[in-house]
Image (cartoon, helix red, strand yellow):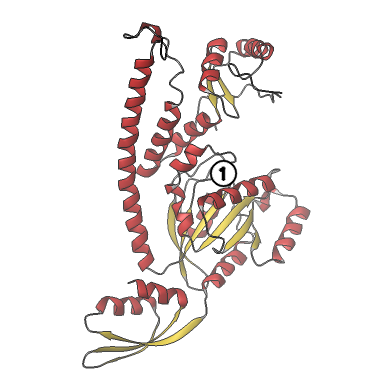
Amino acid sequence: MAGALPELVVTGAEVVRLARAAPGTLFGTGKVAELKARFEALEVELVLVDGPVSPVQQRNLEKEWGVKLLDRTGLILEIFADRARTREGVLQVELAALSYQRTRLVRAWTHLERQRGGFGFVGGPGETQIEADRRAIDEQVIKLKRQLDRVVKTRELHRAARRKVPFPVVALVGYTNAGKSTLFNRMTGAEVLAKDMLFATLDPTMRGVVLPSGRKVILSDTVGFISDLPTQLVAAFRATLEEVLEADLILHVRDISHPETEEQAADVNDILQSLGVAEATPRFEVWNKLDLLPPDRREALSVQAGRHDDLFALSALTGEGLPRLLDAISTVFDEEKSERVLTLGFEDGRRRAWLHGEGVVQQETQGKSGYRIAVRWTARQEQRYREL
């Protein structure tokens, strides 16, 4: 959080239990007054509410308390804006922010009573100004969506090109701050931003990795998931998570040292399901951050994970347990191979080059009209060959 708002100093936190939310102020009048006194005493300038706050509630509380107020969605947008690096990430943040702002135009219009036109019988004073602002936001949304479409099309071209290269895609997913980027760095030798803060990775990062078996895969690091992600953010960031939909193997990275690791894992699985990730896609669960656990707990988890082919206990920071994971990834893609004889014409140079580039050619003879090629390949490689 400090990375998103460098000047932020947390002065306190409190869980407020509500029998029901007050429509105008969220909290009851007594609680509003009590909190106001605390905020004034501590000279608070920003209040964060971990939950939804309606535009009317936000306006009234800011006026009553004399502070800036952010609800859960607003805070997530602030952090996302700080972390976006690629063109697509920046556009997605702007799009989500505009969608959020459009619903809150009721907020700080102190000048509305002075707006021209009408008697206020329908819609009230300032309706014209709010509608004008909505139109301006809608026009900007359309413009951003067009730009985003172009960026997404470019990414689709890149994915289409990768499909012709038969390197499987392995996607790292997990709750925010689970250690995905640290694991990514450990596996690839890359220097991806890996810090102890929310959403350190907002844009997907991809690198090639050569496994111990010699097979090459593409490793994709993705944005961290979070519980109760607002619907407009899920929609805006869906393109960022498209790499997960394309994945041949998913590594679900969990911070096994976190007290709420089970709840976080459930949230991730729910989001994967909502994204439409196929159940048939192989999935490994990676229990990360063993180094933060006491020796007896670490040993117990390692033994427990060792009893399952799809569970792995490791420390991305120290590398403990990583060899077993790499071997298992290799095994997933060491598919059963079949042999076949192909006949290619001289004009099929592209397919012939692809076969040789794959290393599947066992024997080749040249005739008058072309080549007779004996290959040994996996079902996956055969499918890719058909798509050429």
> Disc 1 designates what residue?
176
* Amino acid type of the residue that numbered disc 1 sits on in the rendered structure: Thr
Question: Which residue in the rendered view is the most extreme toward the front?
Answer: 121
Vertical placement of residue 180 versus 321, above or below: above
Residue sitting at 36 percent across and 75 percent down? 386
In the picture, the quarter occupied by the N terminus is top right
Q: Is residue 283 left or right of residue 19?
A: left
| Label 1 secondary element | loop
Residue sitting at 69 percent across and 43 percent down? 260
Question: Residue 184 location, x and y as percent?
Answer: 51, 55
| Residue 220, visible in the rendered structure | no
Residue 47, image quadrant:
top right
Question: Residue 165 location, x and y as percent?
Answer: 37, 68
Given residues 178 and 383, the one toward you in this image is 383
Q: Residues within 10 Å of mark 1 (few under 14, many from 20)?
A: many
Question: Residue 288 location, x and y as percent?
Answer: 63, 53
Residue 366, image quadrant:
bottom left
Given residues 121 and 215, the one toward you in this image is 121
Instruction: Tell how many labels.
Output: 1
Question: Residue 54 location, x and y as percent?
Answer: 54, 23
Vertical placement of residue 85 versus 215, above or below: above
Residue sitting at 56 percent across and 25 percent down? 53
Residue sitting at 57 percent across and 25 percent down? 48
